[in-house]
Image (tube, grey):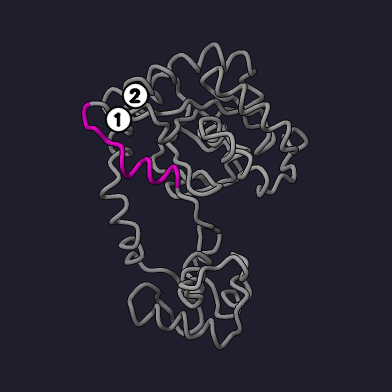
Amino acid sequence: MPAEARAPHFVQSFERGLAVIRAFDAEHPELTLSDVARSCELTRAAARRFLLTLVDLGYVHTDGRMFRLTPRVLELGYSYLSSFTLPEIAEPHLEQLVAQIRESSSLCVLDGDDIVYVARVPTRRIMTATITVGTRFPAHVTSVGRVMLAHLPEEEIDARLSRADLRPLTARTLASAGALRAELRRVRRQGYAIVDQELEEGLRSVAVPVRDRDGEVVAAVNVPVHAARNSVESVRRDLLPPLLATVARIEADLRVTGLTGPARDASRHTGTHR
C-alpha cells in the first residue's frame, strides 16, 4: 500500500511482519535471512528481528541459517475458516461434480482485487502454477473472478478496472478496461464466464456464480480444462450444464443453512494483498 494512502492508524511494522510470513510459499518453503530481506525489501537487520520474533512465537523454525514456517501458522487462518462454512457445504458437491466430469473443480471468493481458492477437488495438474486452498490470482483474468466482478455495481467495477494491472499474461488476455467492461456485461447477461487461455496458455476455464439465500453473489465455482482437448464449444456443451446443476445444489444448501455473513464479507473485502 502506498505510504500516501495509509490511514493514521496504519502500523507499518505489522505490515512488514505479515510480509515476512507471506515470503514463504510452495516454491520457497525455506529461505535465508538475505532471501527474506530481498523479498520483503527490508534491511538484513530488520528482517532478522522479524524472523527471530516469529521464531520466538513458534511460527518459524530455523537451523541457524535457513528459516521455514511451522504448522502453527495455520492458526492465523483457522478463525476465518472455522466460521466460513461455505467450503464445507460446497466440497461434497464439488466431489460429485469431479467424479462425473473427471475434471478438477474449485470454489473461490473475491478478496480485494484477487480471487482466492477456498475449496478445491483436483483430478490432475493442468496449470504451471500449483493450485491449493489459499492460492490467489488477479480477478479480472479468471473465470471465477469475472462472474463475481460482473455482479458488482457499475461504479465499483469501474474503480477496480481503473486500478487493475492490465498487462497481458498471454497473447489472448483482454488488456483494456473497455474490453473487460464489455465482457463483464456479457458475463452478467449469460450467467457464466468462459476464459480462454488468458491466464495461462493451454488453459480454458468455465465458472458460475454462487448466490446466498438473499440472491447475493458470494463465491464462484469453476472447472478448468486443457485447451488442446476441450474446445470452447465442448466446454459450454458438456461442462456448463453439470456445473450449473452443482451450483444449484450448493445454493439449495445455502438457503437451508442461511449462510450470508462470512461469505459476503469475503466477497466485498477491499484490502490490499500480495
- Label for residue 96? 2
The amino acid marked with disc number 2 is Gln
Numbered disc 2: secondary structure = helix
User: Would you call the spot at circle 2 few (<14 residues within 10 Å), some (14-19), or many (20 or more)?
Assistant: some
Numbered disc 1: secondary structure = helix
- Label for residue 92? 1
**What secondary structure characterizes most of the magenta part?**
helix
x 52%, y 48%: residue: 136
From the viewer's perspective, tell me whether residue 161 is left or right of residue 212: right
Point out the stretch of residues depicted in magenta: 256-268
> Along the line of sight, which residue is nearer the eye, 16 or 216?
216
Q: Residue furthest bottom?
A: 45
From the viewer's perspective, tell me whether residue 72 is left or right of residue 135: left
Residue 181 on the magenta span: no
Give x and y (percent) for residue 127.
59, 39
Snapshot quadrant of residue 109: top left
> Along the line of sight, which residue is nearer the eye, 150 or 166?
150
